[in-house]
Amino acid sequence: MKNTNNAIEIDNVSMAFIMQTEKTEHLKEYFIKRIKGQIAHQKFEALKDVSLDIQKGDVFGLVGLNGSGKSTLLKMVSGILAPTSGKITTHGSVAPLIELGAGFDMELTARENIFLNGSVLGIPRGTVKEKFDEVVDFSELHDFLDVPMKNYSSGMVARIGFAMATIIKPDILIVDEILGVGDFKFQEKCEQRINYLMSGGTTVLMVSHSIEQIERLCNKAAWLNKGRLVATGAVDEICEMYKSQA
């Protein structure tokens, strides 16, 4: 029987992608070869038989080299990708902070996108109105509210995205490298917001290129290597193990 204190249950999950290995110079050549069955493909296993239980209130970090499957796992927990096999169960509301700009219409202004993104995240319009000034204050983009977001830098988009994803306390917050975007002061604000969410019981599942950030923010971690789970446990123990082998 599963622990009722779990926020996320990842049961024997695998994710495979079919990749084209045959190179074609032109689109016409590609379709001719495809019709004739001459396009070679290769199966790539991004994740293989991964099982993890993440408890409510944990700040759980994923460590591993590029290509180890960390971001793929986050996308599956968020519901963006469906696993090839296995099952993922989440308990409560999930706010994914994964792909910058996802849920935004870059032709619209930031003011318009705050309401659009609120709708995408399932936040009532009245709540967005009530929290509007808080979002603007956090993002520090008062002077750019009526500028189309296509003119924003990735860091500016990140500010709005992070502020919106944390406008209300979700049960589960998924964070993929977002804390590495923007200047040092903004990263500090993001960390403070995560600490605030933690104090209210929000479960955080995160990936960061900074192992120091994982050690500083997380209480537990898992190490992935080439799509397989190597170890899971207390963050200090896992990070030391990873650093000694990486």
Image (spheres, grey):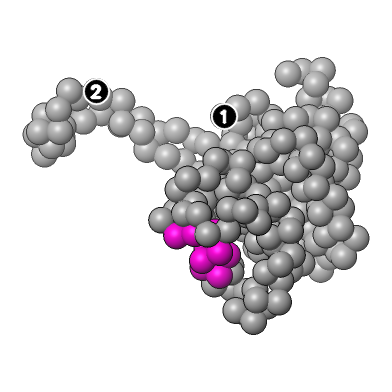
Amino acid under label 1? Answer: Gly
* Residue 88 covered by magenta stretch: no
Q: Which residues are magenta?
A: 108-117
Which of 74 and 197 lies nearest the eye of the viewer? 197
Decide: is 116 above or below 208: below
State the quadrant of the N terminus: bottom right
Rendering quarter of residue 110 = bottom right
Q: Is residue 23 left or right of residue 121?
A: left
Residue underneath mark 2 = 23
Q: Dot 2, how many residues are within 10 Å of its Cα: few (below 14), some (14-19), or many (20+)?
A: few
Q: Is residue 223 left or right of residue 220?
A: left
Decide: is 105 above or below 205: below
Residue located 86% across and 35% down the image:
215
Residue underneath mark 1 = 67
- Distance CA(mark 2)–CA(mark 1): 22 Å
The secondary structure making up most of the magenta span is: helix
